[in-house]
Image (cartoon, rainbow, N blue to C red):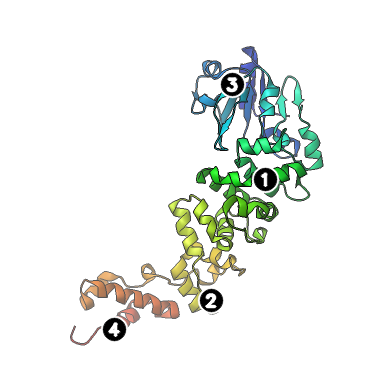
């Protein structure tokens, strides 16, 4: 396994100081799957204070749980080998004790495919047979699956996400699947932020529909609502559009998600209930309601082809008119009527873009002026 130079350097510094250091988790899994790892995590026998003393630039936000982020070319999380005590609220451990053994650290992980370690000195270390499960294409919990999900119920959604990421013929191991169903009620104890992160990542995965099939089986117990089946893979691999498809079919999900104002506004636009446009004027009117940026997504979400290109140069809103408010003030003065006239003119040019000249619009505006005003 060829490590990036900045990751290799961190391992070297730890080794030279007399500490063990292993790359762990997703980077090793992805490498063994033939993919290029993007994020690297290191587990070490060094304590957080020892890690901080060895590197000039670090952040210690997760120091309570043994994690220090080394600020190299890219941030790398370096975590002390640890054992975790009892968990509270199916979210986080009450206490953490440090260890000098990599085995202790691997035993606390979620799935065997994520419990494989790599050392440049000794190679791959796989005491829990994660490589065998990679070859079998099985997602299997480490140790007792019921205990793993009681410790952190987010692991239930992570199992679904791995299915959505890896796709067929990957399967969740039978006992792990049974434990997911038996523990799914614990999902309610998770923060909405953590749930949102997993749901968004599931929806935007390559094999989202495959993962959602597993989520359907536990949705009612986990969220209090059945998940309506849908072919999310039919939508382009776009995070916002996939989330729009999922929430359109399952609007109850909004009560479980924490979304930015930008995302909320986007979803309001693409979820807008309007007829499918048949004519170009209808298409332009729809564009005025949902916006140029969202028109194609609105159409794609309903199984229609993108059509923005058909009206790309056409006037849509007030800002596209060949006249502005100042041009009309002589006729109407200032006040609400001026805005109403501009809106009316915008409607007319959406019906017939050839009307969008200064001369024609001023005439149309003059025709709308009430006698005596």
Q: CA distance from mark 4 to mark 3?
A: 79 Å
Q: Is residue 69 left or right of residue 157?
A: left
Which residue appears at 75% of the width and 42% of the height? 175
> Which residue is the extreme one toward the left?
372
Q: Nearer the viewer, mark 3 or mark 1?
A: 1
Circles 3, 2 touching at the beta carbon (< 8 Å): no
Residue underneath mark 1: 182
The residues tagged by marks 2 and 4 sit, at their Cα atoms, a distance apart of 28 Å
Q: Is residue 43 left or right of residue 321?
A: right
In three-dimensional space, the C-alpha distance between marks 2 and 1, rounded to whole angstroms, equals 47 Å
Q: On the image, numbered disc 3 is attached to which residue? A: 97
Task: Give 237 or 265, whichever is nearer the viewer.
Answer: 265
Quick check: marks 4 and 1 in contact, CB under 8 Å? no
Residue 1 image-quadrant placement: top right
Q: Considering the numbered disc 2 on the image, is that residue within a helix, a strand or a loop?
A: loop
Secondary structure of residue under mark 1: helix
Q: Horizontally, is 219 left or right of 71 in the view? A: right
Q: Which quarter of the rendered picture does the C terminus lie within?
A: bottom left
Q: Nearer the viewer, mark 2 or mark 4?
A: 2
Instruction: Name above or below for residue 232 compared with residue 112.
Output: below
Q: Closer to the camera, 362 or 130?
A: 130
Q: Which residue position is annotated with label 2?
A: 277
Is residue 360 placed above or below 121 in the rendered structure? Answer: below
């Amino acid at each position: 396994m060829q490590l990036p130079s900045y990751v290799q350097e961190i391992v070297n510094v730890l080794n030279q100081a007399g500490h063990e250091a292993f790359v762990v988790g997703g980077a090793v899994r992805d490498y063994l799957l033939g993919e290029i790892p993007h994020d690297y995590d290191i587990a070490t026998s060094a304590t957080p204070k020892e890690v901080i003393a060895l590197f000039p630039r670090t952040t210690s936000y997760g120091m309570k749980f043994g994690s220090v982020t080394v600020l190299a070319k890219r941030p790398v999380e370096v975590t002390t080998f640890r054992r975790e005590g009892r968990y509270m609220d199916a979210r986080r451990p009450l206490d953490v004790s440090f260890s000098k053994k990599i085995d202790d650290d691997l035993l606390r992980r979620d799935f065997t495919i994520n419990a494989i370690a790599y050392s440049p000195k000794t190679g791959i270390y796989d005491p829990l047979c994660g490589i065998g499960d990679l070859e079998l294409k099985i997602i299997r919990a480490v140790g007792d699956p019921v205990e793993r999900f009681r410790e952190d119920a987010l692991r239930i959604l992570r199992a679904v996400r791995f299915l959505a990421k890896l796709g067929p013929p990957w399967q969740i191991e039978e006992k792990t699947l049974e434990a997911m169903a038996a523990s799914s009620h614990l999902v309610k104890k998770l923060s909405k932020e953590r749930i949102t992160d997993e749901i968004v990542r599931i929806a935007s995965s390559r094999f989202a529909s495959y993962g959602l099939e597993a989520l359907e089986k536990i949705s009612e117990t986990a969220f209090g609502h059945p998940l309506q089946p849908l072919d999310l893979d039919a939508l382009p691999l776009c995070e916002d559009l996939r989330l729009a498809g999922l929430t359109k079919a399952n609007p109850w999900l909004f009560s479980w998600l924490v979304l930015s104002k930008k995302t909320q506004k986007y979803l309001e636009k693409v979820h807008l209930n309007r007829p499918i446009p048949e004519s170009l004027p209808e298409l332009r009117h729809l564009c005025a309601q949902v916006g140029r940026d969202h028109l194609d997504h609105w159409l794609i979400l309903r199984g229609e082809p993108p059509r923005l290109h058909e009206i790309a140069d056409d006037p849509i809103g007030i800002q596209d008119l060949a006249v502005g408010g100042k041009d009309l003030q002589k006729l109407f003065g200032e006040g609400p009527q001026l805005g109403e006239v501009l809106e009316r003119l915008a409607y007319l040019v959406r019906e017939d873009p050839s009307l969008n000249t200064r001369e024609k619009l001023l005439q149309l505006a003059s025709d709308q002026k009430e006698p005596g005003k």
